[in-house]
Amino acid sequence: MEITTPAKDGFFMPGEFEEHDGCIMIWPERPGSWAYGAVAARKVFAEIATAISESESVYMLVNDRTAESARQLLPEKIRLINIDTDDAWARDMCPTFVKNSAGRVCGVEWEFNAWGGAFDGLYKSWDKDNAAARKFCRRVGYECYNAKPFVLEGGSVHSDGQSTVITTEACLLSKGRNPNLTKEQIEKRLHEYLGAEKVIWLPRGIYNDETNEHVDNVCAFVRPAEVVLAWTDDKNDPQYALSKACLDVLENETDARGRKFTVHKLLIPKKPVCVTENDLAGLEFEDGEDIREAGERLAASYANFYISNGAVILPVFGDENDEKAVALMQRLFPERKIVPIFARDIIIGGGNIHCITQQIPKGAK
């Protein structure tokens, strides 16, 4: 029997700015990601989940150890689902959802190998993370396509909902993902499983991003043919060359429908966000886990936001560029409330608001 794919069945990945049924998150626990017993991180996760739940359903994955603390901090309307995971990066380990023209929604499960497997993965064991996508779909009732053994994380792709997908070469061509596949073969997988007709390959992402530079930290669609791009005007900042390389591509490309891109420059924090000795004192690393160092620059970016039905949940860092980011996003999303969330307790774990959320498009199961 022929193995089918979403594209063969008429499915495609909608834009995040389109209507959602809900959002998946995972309650934080891992001592190597969330300092001091995840106390501060859980408060921020609860703040984000609460803001999202004002306009769409939220599913929070928990386990026997974490369910009680989640229930104490979260609104009653947020549904807890007992699915154990290795960490809390829902974007990368939970299903990517696709939709067809009749409005039916299905999940896609990718191979997850902790952002690089044996080559440069961030922890040694990821079996529970790798099983989470299918478990969620079964529990909630979505059919699920199996894209394994193709390695991909949800944070490495963005879609405009009209057959254009953006990604980064730094991530998808990294040796820890799919080293036996060519760029053309990888692109074909994006066509098959995301319904992409055109893939825009940005060269780089955010400086020092340990995911091998996911696209969701550097560039995001705000609507078809219109993106925000993480940016700095400081030519001495290592981010400048990376963002300039992405801008050069975007200014010379068209989307799947032949439209030129409108690019809005979204400044990164003026002052780099770095790991402190106090942060390190609260983290407990396992053997084989990526270890942080005091002074290490983290991949802080305002582009790592989540678009809910009624709001844009935007990371801020106590930086002088916070207000500029809020103002730009309000101009780009006049129909939504901009909800700034102080996100330092998330970025210490390595990612940010978009990384801990995964949208479920509106539609029938």
Image (tube, grey):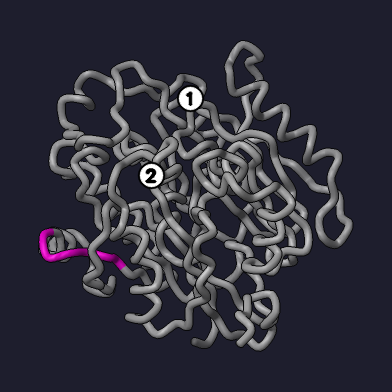
Q: Nearer the viewer, residue 48 or 291?
A: 291
- Counting residues from the start of the chain, the first of labels 1 and 2 encountered is 1
Looking at the rendered image, the quarter that the N terminus falls into is bottom right
Considering depth in this image, is 4 or 275 the residue closer to the camera?
4
- Residue drawn 44% across and 34% down? 210
Residue 153 location, x and y as percent? 49, 53
The answer to which image quadrant residue 237 occupies is: top right
Kindly identify which residue carries mark 2: 341
Is residue 312 at all visible to an observer of this figure?
Answer: no
- 61 is within the stretch colored magenta: yes
Q: Amino acid at mark 1?
A: Glu
Quadrant housing residue 164: bottom right
Q: Which residues are magenta?
A: 60-65
Residue 129: x and y, percent? 33, 58
Q: Nearer the viewer, residue 97 or 325?
A: 97
Dot 2: element:
strand
Tags 1 and 2 in contact by the CB under 8 Å rule? Answer: no
How far apart marks 1 and 2 lie (CA) works out to 15 Å
Within 10 Å of the Cα at label 2, are there few (<14), some (14-19), or many (20+) other Cα atoms? Answer: some
Q: Is residue 5 above or below residue 84?
A: below
Instruction: Classify residue 247 by image quadrant.
Output: top right
Instruction: Give the tally of numbered discs.
Output: 2
Residue that mark 1 sits on = 320
Q: Is residue 325 left or right of residue 340?
A: right
